[in-house]
Image (cartoon, helix red, strand yellow):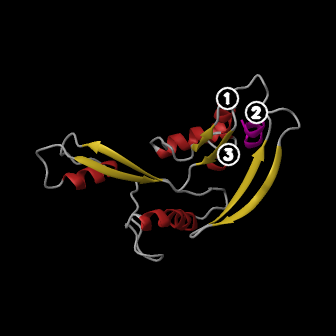
Amino acid sequence: MGILSSLNYGLQIGSVHVPGLMDIESYATVHQMVSTVRGVRRADVTALDAIRAAFPGGSMTGAPKVRTMAIIDSLEGRARGVYSGCIGFMSFNDTFDLNIVIRTAVMQHEERQDGAAGGRQEDCRTQAANGAASAPAPVRCMSIGAGGAIVVQSQLEAEYEEMRLKARALLRAVGMCEGVEGPVPVLAE
């Protein structure tokens, strides 16, 4: 299902309108292009059906959506969790307002099972367990999703710097980044 067809899925013909197209919203660390799309759902389609069709958003997957999601899944090696999903509200009258989750820090609290060092995914557990090898200890790990649109014209270095820029505000907020030009810790698989 393509980007336009996923937005049109289950909506009454002629009801789709775009009150805000490519509006620029400015924030402390980034300018974000935002479009608002509205429509009236057909009676035979549930609100959850419409949400399932719209997410993950085409801006997070590319097109064709289903094939691109399969490629992303094979390359990334782990689930994205809430990243590129949605957060918002749904009322009892089926009105809903959702966003696409980007640049969001997710904290995980885990019980340490053993002291064995694993790969990069185990770094935060291993570091927290140093010096406490005997008793399991709770460990906090933070995951920040950030990325960019990769196209044929993309240049690796520029895309990498864009991803670092997008993650920098969250890293700075939690004390893991020293200013705009400072180092940004990146765990690569």
Q: Quadrant of residue 131?
A: bottom left
Q: Amino acid at mark 3?
A: Gly
Span shown in magenta: 1-10
Residue 157: give its label.
none
User: Can you give x and y, in whole percent of width and height, for residue 187 in the image?
Assistant: 39, 57
Q: Residue at x 69, y 44 (%)?
A: 63
The alpha-carbon separation of the residues under discs 2 and 1 comes to 9 Å
Q: Are marks 3 and 2 in contact (CB under 8 Å)?
A: no
Toward the left, the furthest residue is 134
Q: Position of residue 149 (x, y in %)?
A: 63, 56
Query: Which residue carries the number 2 mark?
Result: 9
**First along the sequence among labels 1 and 3:** 1
Secondary structure, mark 1, is helix
Residue type marked 2: Tyr
Residue 105 percent location from the top left of the image: 45, 54
Residue 145 vertical placement versus 95 (above, below) = below
State left or right for residue 159 relative to residue 25. left
Residue at numbered disc 1: 49
Q: Is residue 37 left or right of residue 29?
A: right
Quarter containing the N terminus: top right
User: Considering the numbered disc 3 on the image, is that residue within a helix, a strand or a loop?
Assistant: helix
Residue 14, position as x, y percentages in the image? 89, 37
Secondary structure state at the residue bearing disc 2: loop
Amino acid type indicated by mark 1? Asp
Counting residues from the start of the chain, the first of labels 2 and 1 encountered is 2
Q: Nearer the viewer, residue 103 or 77?
A: 103
Identify residue for label 3. 58
Asked whether the beta carbons under mark 2 and mark 1 sit within 8 Å of each other, the answer is yes
Side (left or right) of 189 relative to 128: right
Q: Are marks 1 and 3 in contact (CB under 8 Å)?
A: no
Task: Bin the neighbour count of mark 2 within 10 Å (Cα to Cα): few under 14, some 14-19, many 20 and up.
Answer: some
